[in-house]
């Protein structure tokens, strides 16, 4: 559906303003789709983001500040999200081998199983399925990268 129809207006100051609003609206739409797909797994969008980041460093683990730097929403309270995932036995904190004052976040077997279950489910019914093909997705990625320059 066109952004004009979604926002019920065609009064934009410029195509650039329209594009910015379209990006914001579309980001919320994609996030809602992913949030809905995560609901049966009992994790939030932000918790899934943290699990994915930690999974990318598995089995070594990753420091909290590095997780924060990789978050999609950097205004999220990373420590609180990690605490919730520790309560759910998805993550553990360990003292860093490099510096005893630092804590490393490690994915537990339960957390790894959850990531694998989500991946398995999303292979057949991905919330990332779209009506655009890989060529258009690549073009969109390049345009979004340019937008942030």
Image (cartoon, grey):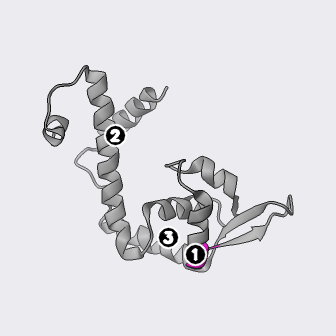
Residue that carries the numbered disc 1 in the rendered image: 90
Q: Quarter-wise, where is residue 106 in the image?
A: bottom right
**Could you tell whether 1 is left or right of 107 in the image?**
left
Residue that carries the numbered disc 2 in the rendered image: 24
Q: Going by the picture, which residue comes out furthest to the top? A: 14
Which label's residue is closer to the chain start, 1 or 2? 2
Residue 30 in picture, x, y percent from top left: 32, 51
Nearest-to-viewer mark from 1 and 2:
2
Pointer 2 local density, CA inside 10 Å: few below 14, some 14–19, many at least 20 = few
Residue 94 in picture, x, y percent from top left: 76, 70
Residue 78 in picture, x, y percent from top left: 59, 58
Q: In the image, which residues are magenta?
A: 86-91
Pointer 3 local density, CA inside 10 Å: few below 14, some 14–19, many at least 20 = some
Which label's residue is closer to the chain start, 3 or 1? 1
Residue that carries the numbered disc 3 in the rendered image: 115
The span from disc 2 to disc 3 (Cα, nearest Å) is 27 Å
Which label's residue is closer to the chain start, 2 or 3? 2
Residue drawn at (31%, 23%) of the image: 16
Residue drawn at (30%, 58%) of the image: 33
Secondary structure under badge 2?
Answer: helix
Residue 135 shows in this picture:
no
Nearest-to-viewer mark from 3 and 1:
1
**Could you tell whether 112 is left or right of 58 in the image?**
left
């Amino acid at each position: 559906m066109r952004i004009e129809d979604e926002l019920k207006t065609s009064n934009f100051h410029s195509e650039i303003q329209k594009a910015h609003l379209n990006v914001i609206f579309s980001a919320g739409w994609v996030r809602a789709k992913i949030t809905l797909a995560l609901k049966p797994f009992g994790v939030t969008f932000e918790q899934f983001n943290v699990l994915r980041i930690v999974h990318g460093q598995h089995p070594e683990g990753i420091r909290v500040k590095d997780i924060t730097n990789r978050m999609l929403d950097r205004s999220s309270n990373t420590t609180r999200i990690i605490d919730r995932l520790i309560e759910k036995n998805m993550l553990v904190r360990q003292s860093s081998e490099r510096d005893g004052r630092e804590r490393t976040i490690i994915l537990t077997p339960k957390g790894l199983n959850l990531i694998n279950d989500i991946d398995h489910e999303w292979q057949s019914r991905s919330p990332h399925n779209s009506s655009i093909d890989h060529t258009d997705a690549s073009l969109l990625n390049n345009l979004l990268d340019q937008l942030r320059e």
